[in-house]
Amino acid sequence: MTTTTHQLDNGISLTVYHPAPCDTPQPAVVLCHGFCGIQGLLLPAFAQAFAQAGYLSVTFDYHGFGASEGERGRLVPALQIDDIVSVLQWVSARPEVDESRIGLWGTSLGGAHVFGAARLYPQVKCIISQLAFADGEAIVTGAMTDEEKRGFVESLDKMAQKKAATGKEMFVSITRVLNDEESRAFFDSHKADWPAMDIKIPFLTVRETLLYKPQENARQVTCPTLIVVAGEDTVNPPAQGEALFQAVGAANKRLYREEGARHYDVYRGTHFEAVIAQQLVWFADNL
């Protein structure tokens, strides 16, 4: 297996994991990383497994993150979905790719984005979404009382109004926004080895997440869809993935629950082996 790197005309940086050479066009999988992630961390093991199974596999950085161009740290779900569509279009134009057999894989926030991308690019043949959420409002304010929620939302709205009027906004560390214990530990343990992750992001990213409803896109998706949840996930609780599964409009859909796994456990070890086995079967049957 070999890899090549590419920079798209719009500034998106991507990596192609090439399967063994074949005389006929090959199926492809586009992999979408999660909240403020970068393509070199967590995704390679999945991309390598898919490439070894015969799929041309592509990872990329959203605009503003990793090696891609763009304003650092600006995270807007709709714009990241547009980035996925750009990558899908690039992949479909590759002469070695069978454009009728392109799958979409996403994890965490990327697992939410895949539904919006599939809605905009209906040529996607099948989807795998892992560790995602259905309702951003529930993720952001689920632990708050009604009074706390009202005050928090009002504060965010005032910040958005100030930005619109003055162009000024507050930038904070990633762990100030993604502040659950699992995510703080993950980012703190990796930012030294992956300095591209150690950036400031707009605090209004919280408002973007709160307003984001992936389940609305999922209702419009009709291609075969596998939803993967981790049984002990405290970042995006399994109930969120189950709600996303219920929302998916496809007749051919499946929910897989990896018991005993937390959010970041599925990227390595025995949980990774169990999850990737399920995903390879799904692509073999549907892609």
Image: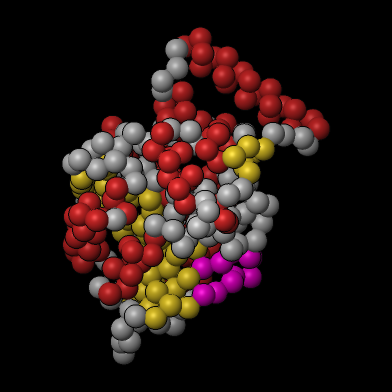
Q: Name the side, left or right, on which 33 lies relative to 224.
A: right
Would residue 17 be visible to someone looking at this image? Answer: yes
Residue 283 falls left or right of residue 87? left
State the residue at coordinates (44%, 82%): 95
The image quadrant of residue 76 is: top right
Hey, which quadrant is residue 43 in on the image? Answer: bottom left
* Residue at the extreme bottom of the image, as rendered: 23
Q: Nearer the viewer, residue 222 or 272?
A: 272
Please tell me whether residue 103 belongs to the stretch shown in magenta: no
Vertical arrangement, residue 266 with respect to residue 101, above or below:
above
The answer to whether residue 252 is above or below residue 148 is below
Image quadrant where one finds the N terminus: bottom left
Residue 264 position in % (x across, y down): 34, 46
Instruction: Indicate how the structure is coloured in the image.
Output: secondary structure
Which residue is outermost to the top?
A: 147
Q: Give how far across and how far down residue 17 sits, in percent.
A: 40, 74
Magenta span covers which residues?
5-14
* Residue 97: percent from left, percent from top: 39, 77
- Viewer-nearest residue: 77 or 206: 206
Q: Which residue is located at x 41 percent, y 22 percent?
A: 142
> What residue lies at 38% left-to-right and 70% top-to-bottom?
57
Image quadrant where residue 284 sits: bottom left
| Side of 179 relative to 275 (left or right) | right
The residue that appears at 55% across and 41% down in the rendered structure is 174
Q: Nearer the viewer, residue 79 or 64?
A: 64
